[in-house]
Image: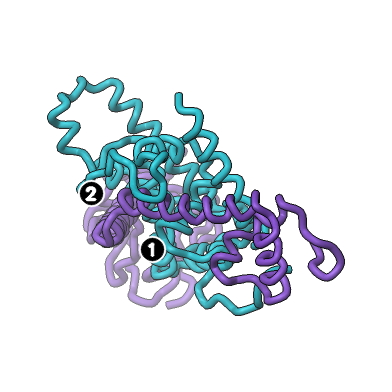
Chain colours: A purple, B cyan
C-alpha cells in the first residue's frame, strides 16, 4: 500500500489500527487512518471495539502472568544444572582417564607390575650358563638377532615404571636398548632360564655398542 | 512503509541465540526474560494448574539451554521454544492421565494465586474471562506469542517485530487475525 498513490481499503486500515493506537504511524499514514475512521462507521466501530477488546485481553492476560520470581527460579535451576553437568563431566573425564590408563597398562604388559620398563643400569644380566653382562648406566646395548626373547635372571634389574622387576623381554633385531628406554614386553614368566622363544640359548645376543 | 525508523536497542532473538551458542550465559538469561511470561501463559491455558505450569516452564528453558545448538539461525527461537513447550505439556498430560485422579480440593490448591474474574467487566459486558481464556487457548502458538508479547510483556508492535525478526506488517496483520479469531471463538462457544 502506498499512501501517496491510493487510499487504503477497510481491511488495510484495520491492520493498521494497533499501530495507530500506539502512535507508531508516520504522520501521512496517521492522518490517512484518522480520516478513514472519521468517514467509515464500520472501521470506527471496529477501532473502538478493538480498544475495548484490547483492554479486556490485557486484563485477562495479566491474571495469568507469573511473577518475576519464576524467572529467578528458572535461572537458579539453570545454574544448578550447569554446575551439576560440569561436575558430572569432570568425574566422567577422570573415570575415563583412569580406565584408559588401566587399559593401556594391561594391554601392553598383561600385568600391572611389568608396565613400561625403564632400564636400571649398573645391574647385570645373568645367563643360564653363568655368564653375565653388566649393564652400566648410560651404556647402550644392541640385540643382534631378530625377535629374540631375552630372559633376565633374578637379580638382573630391568625395572618397570612401578619399580617391578622385569624377567624377560622380546626384542627385534638391531634394537638398541639403553637406560631409560621403554621395551615391548611379553608376559612375565616364572622360569629363570635364559632362552629365546624358540628355546635357543640367548647367550651372546646382547653386545656392548658404547661403553 | 509504516512508522519511523527508530532503532530498538534490545537484542533480537537471533543475536541472543548466537551469543548463547558461543557460550554467553547472560544472553540466555535475556531470552528467559523475553519469553517466560508468554511461555507460562501458553502452558497455563492448557494445564489450568499454576504450579505445574511453573514446573513445565522451567523444564522448557532447561531443555532449550541444553539443546541450544540445535536451534538453527533463521528458524526462529520462539517457534522452536514453543515446540519444546508443546512437547513438555504433552508429556505432562500423559503422566497426569496415568496417575490417579486428584480430588477437586487439590485442584483448587493448584489454582492461580490471582483469582480469575468469572463475571464480565465494564466496557466488555458480553465477554467473560472464561470465554476469553478458552478462546486464547485455541490460538495457534504464533498468534498467541504476538498477543502475549503485546499484552503480557507490554511490547509495541515495532518492538515485537524487532525481537521476532519479522516485518512490522506481519505483526500487525497477525494481531488483526488473532483478534478476529478470538472474537469468532467467543461468539461461537463450544
- What is the chain identity of the residue bearing mark 1? B
Q: Position of residue B70 (x, y in %)?
A: 53, 51
Residue on which disc 2 sits: B114
Q: Position of residue A188 (x, y in %)?
A: 31, 45
Q: Secondary structure at mark 1?
A: helix
Q: Which residue is depicted at the point 79% across and 67% down?
A: A3
Q: Are marks 1 and 2 on the same chain?
A: yes
Indicate whether B127 appears above or below A208: above
In which quadrant is the C terminus of chain B drawn? Answer: top left
Q: Position of residue B81 (x, y in %)?
A: 47, 49
* Residue found farthest to the right: A5
Q: Secondary structure at mark 2?
A: loop
Q: Which residue is depicted at the point 31% across and 70% down?
A: A121
What's the CA distance linking mark 1 and mark 2? Answer: 21 Å
Question: Residue A33's image quarter?
Answer: bottom right
Q: Which residue is depicted at the point 28% across and 20% down?
A: B98
Residue on which disc 1 sits: B33
Few, some or many residues within 10 Å of mark 2 (<14, 14–19, 20+)? few
Q: Which residue is depicted at the point 59% across and 78% down?
A: B7
On the rendered structure, is A144 left or right of B58? right
- What is the chain identity of the residue bearing mark 2? B
Q: Position of residue A78 (x, y in %)?
A: 31, 57
**Are the residues at dot 1 and dot 2 in contact (C-beta closer than 8 Å)?**
no
Relative depth, front residue between B187 and A59: B187
Amino acid at each position: 500500500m502506498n499512501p501517496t498513490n491510493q487510499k487504503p481499503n477497510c481491511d488495510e486500515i484495520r491492520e493498521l489500527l494497533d499501530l495507530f493506537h500506539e502512535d507508531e504511524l508516520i504522520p501521512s499514514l496517521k492522518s490517512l487512518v484518522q480520516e478513514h475512521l472519521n468517514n467509515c462507521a464500520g472501521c470506527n466501530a471496529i477501532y473502538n471495539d478493538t480498544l475495548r477488546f484490547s483492554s479486556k485481553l490485557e486484563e485477562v492476560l495479566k491474571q495469568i502472568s507469573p511473577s518475576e520470581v519464576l524467572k529467578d527460579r528458572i535461572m537458579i535451576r539453570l545454574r544448578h544444572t550447569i554446575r551439576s553437568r560440569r561436575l558430572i563431566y569432570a568425574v566422567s573425564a577422570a573415570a575415563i582417564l583412569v580406565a584408559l590408563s588401566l587399559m593401556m597398562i594391561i594391554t601392553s604388559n598383561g600385568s600391572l607390575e611389568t608396565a613400561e620398563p625403564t632400564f636400571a643400569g649398573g645391574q647385570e644380566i645373568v645367563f643360564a650358563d653363568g655368564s653375565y653382562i653388566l649393564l652400566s648406566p648410560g651404556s647402550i646395548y644392541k640385540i643382534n638377532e631378530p625377535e629374540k626373547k631375552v630372559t633376565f635372571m633374578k637379580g638382573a634389574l630391568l625395572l618397570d615404571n612401578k619399580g617391578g622387576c622385569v624377567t624377560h623381554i622380546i626384542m627385534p633385531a638391531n634394537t638398541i636398548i639403553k637406560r631409560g628406554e621403554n621395551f615391548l614386553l611379553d608376559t612375565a614368566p616364572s622360569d629363570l632360564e635364559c632362552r629365546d622363544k624358540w628355546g635357543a640359548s640367548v647367550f651372546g645376543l646382547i653386545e656392548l655398542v658404547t661403553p | 512503509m509504516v512508522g519511523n525508523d527508530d532503532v530498538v536497542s534490545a537484542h533480537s532473538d537471533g543475536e541472543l541465540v548466537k551469543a548463547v551458542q558461543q557460550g554467553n550465559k547472560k544472553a540466555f538469561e535475556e531470552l528467559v526474560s523475553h519469553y517466560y511470561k508468554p511461555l507460562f501463559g501458553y502452558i497455563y491455558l492448557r494445564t489450568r494448574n499454576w504450579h505445574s505450569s511453573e514446573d513445565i516452564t522451567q523444564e522448557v528453558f532447561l531443555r532449550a539451554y541444553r539443546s541450544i545448538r540445535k536451534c538453527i539461525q533463521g528458524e526462529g527461537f520462539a517457534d522452536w521454544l514453543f515446540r519444546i513447550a508443546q512437547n513438555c505439556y504433552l508429556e505432562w498430560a500423559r503422566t497426569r492421565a496415568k496417575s490417579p485422579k486428584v480430588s477437586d480440593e487439590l485442584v483448587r490448591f493448584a489454582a492461580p494465586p490471582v483469582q480469575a474474574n468469572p463475571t464480565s467487566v465494564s466496557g466488555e459486558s458480553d465477554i467473560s474471562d472464561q470465554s476469553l481464556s478458552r478462546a486464547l487457548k485455541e490460538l495457534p502458538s504464533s498468534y498467541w506469542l504476538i498477543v502475549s508479547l503485546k499484552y503480557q510483556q507490554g511490547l509495541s508492535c515495532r518492538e515485537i517485530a524487532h525481537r521476532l525478526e519479522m516485518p512490522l506488517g506481519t505483526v500487525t496483520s497477525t494481531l488483526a487475525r488473532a483478534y478476529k479469531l478470538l472474537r469468532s471463538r467467543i461468539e461461537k462457544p463450544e
